[in-house]
Every structure is written in C-alpha cells, then in structure tokens.
Amino acid sequence: CHGVQLAEFPIPGDLDVVAFLNDERVVMVECKSSSEVDEVHYLLFLKRVQAFHPDVAIFLADTPAPFSPVRIAAFNRALQHLGYPPLAGSGGFYWGPMSVYMVNVAHSIAISLGDVMRFHERQTHFRESK
C-alpha cells in the first residue's frame, strides 16, 4: 500500500508506504527525495511510528549523499523530544529506538531497503539469543 491515510489516525499526514510481509511483519517507509528535512517533519514521522507501531520504520532519503550532521542532529532532537535516545550509525545508515532506520539510497531503493531488513533481522536475532 502507498499513500495510506487512516480516517482516525491521530497524526497529520499519510503513511507513504506500508508493507505487510509474508511473515506478518509490518514495515512503514517514509520516502523523501532529499535529505534536507526539518526537525518538525522528523517529529511527525516519529509520532506516526508511535501511533502505527510497525515492526520496522524506515525514513528513506532518495539521494546518494550521506546525511549531514545537521540532519542527524535534527532527527536526534526529535527523538529526544519524545524521550528516546539518539540514533546510532554513520554516513547513510542509522538505526534507533522503535526499530527506526534512517537511510539514504547509495545504489538503489531495493538495495537500501534490503540492507535495512537484513540488519534488522540480525539485531532481532541477537536480542532474542540473549
């Protein structure tokens, strides 16, 4: 599904992409054509994640350029505003609380999404084996 709008969803905006995987996981993707997004937009994305509760939430910037420190700081301020710790990662691949990922498109959208899902699987397996 893409451009999903829910009648009683408490946060303004839509869910750009919602994928229901065969193993019953739900993946939410916010797509942007630029990494130049402000803190308010990040905050709304994170609030939609909180309200929708996907298994994986991806903020995808369709640009090969790594995220600037200014953009990462803005995303981290939005996380902090909601009481969460900052992102970990570097360049064009970051991860954080609520299974949130912030990634760019270095090669293709499919490769970037695949990278997130493989990383998420490893993280989930590691947590479950503890």
Image (tube, rainbow, N blue to C red):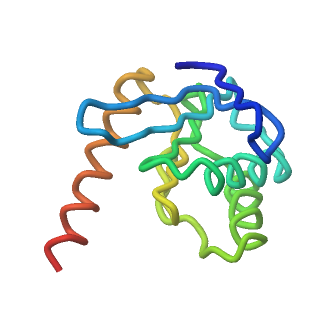
**Outermost residue to the bottom:** 130
Compared with residue 36, is residue 93 higher up or lower down, i.e. above or below? below
In the picture provided, is 40 more to the left or to the right than 120? right
The percent coordinates of residue 91 (x first, y second) are 51, 49
In front here: 123 or 35?
A: 123
In front here: 20 or 116?
A: 20
The percent coordinates of residue 49 (x first, y second) are 61, 51
The quadrant of the rendering that contains the C terminus is bottom left
The percent coordinates of residue 42 (x first, y second) are 74, 49
The percent coordinates of residue 87 (x first, y second) are 56, 65
Q: Residue at x 69, y 66 (%)?
A: 79
Compared with residue 60, is residue 92 higher up or lower down, i.e. above or below? below
Compared with residue 31, is residue 24 higher up or lower down, i.e. above or below? below
In the picture provided, is 88 more to the left or to the right than 51? left
Q: Residue at x 68, y 23 (%)?
A: 33
In the picture provided, is 65 more to the left or to the right than 94? right
Compared with residue 117, is residue 108 higher up or lower down, i.e. above or below? above
- Counting the numbered discs, the total is 0
In the picture provided, is 91 more to the left or to the right than 82? left
In front here: 91 or 7?
A: 7
Question: Which quadrant of the structure image shows residue 2?
Answer: top right
